[in-house]
Each structure stands twice: as structure tokens, then as C-alpha cells.
Image (cartoon, helix red, strand yellow):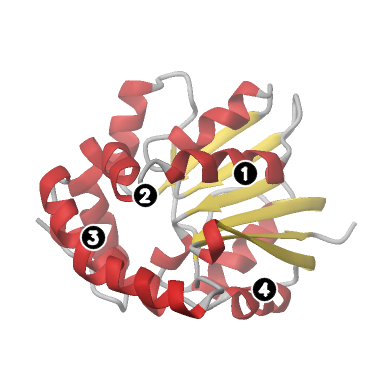
Amino acid sequence: MTRASLDKQPHEVASMFDDVAERYDLTNDVLSLGQDRRWRKEVAKAVDARPAQKVLDLAAGTGTSSLPFARTGAYVVPCDFSQGMLRVGKQRQPWLPYTAGDATRLPFKDDTFDAVTISFGLRNVHDTDAALREMYRVTRPGGRVVICEFSHPTWAPFRTVYTEYLMRALPPVARAVSSNPDAYVYLAESIRAWPDQPALAERLGKAGWSRVAWRNLSGGIVALHRGFKAS
């Protein structure tokens, strides 16, 4: 079993997600108390995929996050660098065009997609800024990016309680339901170390994205950031 460290070496992160692939969706559902399903609905609304549009879903894992886009009639490409995740996804949804790819070196041409989205995966990328620039490169002019990521609760007392949950309650729950509980200790640590909402918005702007805005879900446990590529 592999547990990545906070320097996020790509081979460690990929191997860690290979280990948890089979029960990943179930574990997320339990640890988020079912909230992950609501968060994904909000992502789908923010992406606003339309028939015949091309959507790139990064860190797509088993493809659960890609299904809402496919249902709109959009052409969605689930992309992940964990071979284990992609294998499980291909078994479950064989019709989706799963693609292996590193977010910092995407295997797509410039100006390909109408929308690029990543949910709960950006903080696991070794070079966040390189990934934001790559997303910009493969998005067509006028297209958009939507990032859904764990963030920082806005109400200080709740933030304290939430941090305690991450470090104390999450590991024992993960031990009960996950095939690799140590992976969830890393995930808790990576959430605590992740930049807050304004800091991520600033990084999006530096990568070239314009009209960057965000909104909080579940009191800031999760934040949705969106930006556009100038026409």
C-alpha cells in the first residue's frame, strides 16, 4: 500500500490512487456524509455543458464525475493519471473515452475543449500552476474552467471543528471503509495545506484565466472556482 507525501511526487500519488480505486467512490460518499453527490450537481451546473460541446474532466478517476456531462449530450473525456482508476472506470462505464494523462502535460492540442473541469484533484497535482496553464492551453477561446476543491470554511468556529474532524475522525472512518486508510491521512493533510479561496483565484488569474470568481459550498468546506479564456 502506498501513501503519498505532501511534496506530491507523481508516481506516489498515482500508486496511492491505484490502491484505493475499487472502493474510492463508496469511501468518498461515507466520508463526506453524502455531500459529494450534491457537490457534483453544483459542478455540473457551473460547467453548463451543452450538446456537442467538448468537456475535459481531469482527475476523473472512475468516471463518476463525467457522467453528468455525458447525460447533457456533450462529448466528455475522462482523464486521469491513475491506471487503476481508469481500469475500474472502464469496467463500469465502457462507453466513455478514458484517457491516461498528467495534468501538467496534457495529451491534447491547443484550443480543443469548450470546458475543462477538475473536482477534488487539483491539490494532488505536483505543480498546480503548470496544471492551470495546461488547462488554459487546451481550452478554446471563450471556453471556461471549473474547479471544485476542498477549501477553508469561512466561519472560524466551524473551521476549527472541521480541522479536528479531518485529522481525528477521518482516519478511523477510512480504516473501516477504504482499502488504503493511509491514503486518507494524506488527503486530510493535503486539504489542510491547500490555499484558501482568494489565493486559488489569484493563481488562476496568473495562469491567464479571466473573470475568475468562486462560491462556497457547505460553508466553505468546498469551493467552486470558475474562469474564462478570453475570446
Q: Residue furthest front?
A: 157
Q: Residue at x 22, y 38 (%)?
A: 23
The reply to whether discs 3 and 4 touch (Cβ–Cβ < 8 Å) is no
The residues bearing labels 4 and 1 have C-alpha atoms spaced at a distance of 18 Å
Disc 2 target residue: 32
* Element carrying mark 4: helix
Q: Position of residue 107 (x, y in %)?
A: 53, 50
Q: How many labels does the image show?
A: 4
What amino acid does circle 4 point to?
A: Ala
The reply to whether discs 1 and 3 touch (Cβ–Cβ < 8 Å) is no
Earlier sequence position, callout 1 versus callout 3? 1
What amino acid does circle 2 point to?
A: Ser
Disc 3 target residue: 170
**Marker disc for residue 94:** none
Q: In which quarter of the image is the N terminus?
A: bottom left
Disc 1 target residue: 42
Disc 4 target residue: 201
User: Left of 223 or right of it: where is 19?
Assistant: left
Earlier sequence position, callout 1 versus callout 2? 2
Q: Residue at x 38, y 78 (%)?
A: 160
The residues bearing labels 1 and 2 have C-alpha atoms spaced at a distance of 15 Å
Q: Which residue lies furthest to the right in this view?
A: 231
Q: Which residue is drawn at 28% across and 31% down?
A: 88
CA neighbours of label 1 inside 10 A, class few (<14), some (14 to 19), many (20+): some
Q: In which quarter of the image is the C terminus?
A: bottom right
Earlier sequence position, callout 4 versus callout 1? 1
